[in-house]
Image (cartoon, rainbow, N blue to C red):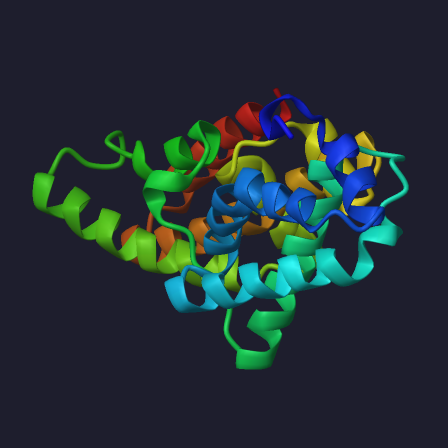
Amino acid sequence: MSDSKISDVGLVDLFKGGDITAFEEIISRYEAKVMNLALRFTRNQEDAEEVMQDVFTTVYRKIDGFRGQSAFSSWLYRIVVNAAFMKLRKKKQSQTVSMEDLAPAVKQYCMERDSVTSTHSYNVTVTRELQEVLQRAIDKLPDQYRAVFVLRDVDGLSNQETGEILDLSIPAVKSRLHRSRIMLRKRLQRYYEDFTGNKAVIEEVNDDAADQVAA
């Protein structure tokens, strides 16, 4: 069987028919992507590995649940998201996202604050503390908003791909992404107000960020 030339749907059909090598090929094709996505949510290698095991166990047991109404990858990634959140809830912890992972619009709001002050030491302090503040803010996003934020702004998926994975319409994806960004911005705004005592500057910056998000 020349596995590389068989479509995902073809592999699923073979696996449903009892061909275990088809399931092995599915794992080969997707284990790296599943692992990377699990890491995005758990931020922990061991947890991500456990999520990946859970995911492929679920695929093995529930392959009949794939009806072909969306891409197989979307069905699979939905299982990853659910398994990752289940793992996080069991451990009573949440994932964090590094500054380097963030989409340009969010990163720019977090990092490009040179207009506030030209003092280098101040910027270094703000950057370090901002990362901690941002991580805590993402931790506190409700699951439905965090999932959209991670898939769109961290993992870089499109609105359509995110919608297929989470079973949401594209307008719903856009709405949740917008709300998640607003929630993060508000927390960052409070941080800047406390740190600088300059609310006027923060409001101006916040308006700029709002324009970027709406674009």
Query: Taking 28 as reference, is 207 above or below it?
Result: above
Which image quarter: residue 8?
Answer: top right
Q: Nearer the viewer, residue 122 or 143?
A: 143
Residue drawn at the location 61% of the way across and 53% of the way down: 146
The percent coordinates of residue 128 (x first, y second) are 23, 53
Estimate the x, y position of residue 56 in percent, counting from the top left.
64, 57
Task: Count the numbered circles shown.
Answer: 0
- Does residue 206 appear left or right of residue 26 in this picture? left
Relative height, residue 206 to residue 85 (above, below): above
Q: Can residue 60 be seen in this view?
A: yes
- 62 w.r.t. 188: above or below: below
Residue 215 falls left or right of residue 66? left
Residue drawn 43% across the image and 58% down it: 96
Residue appearing at x 14%, y 33% in the figure: 118
Horizontal placement of 136 versus 125: left or right?
Answer: right
Q: Which of 177 and 68 is in front in this view?
A: 68
Counting from the top left corner in percent of width and height, residue 173 is at 74, 37
| Picture quarter with the N terminus | top right
Quarter of the rendering containing residue 167: top right
Residue at coordinates 49% horizontally, 36% vertically from top-left? 206
The quadrant of the rendering that contains the C terminus is: top right
- Residue 163 in view in this figure: no
Q: In which quarter of the image is residue 158?
A: top right
Q: Nearer the viewer, residue 204 or 176?
A: 176
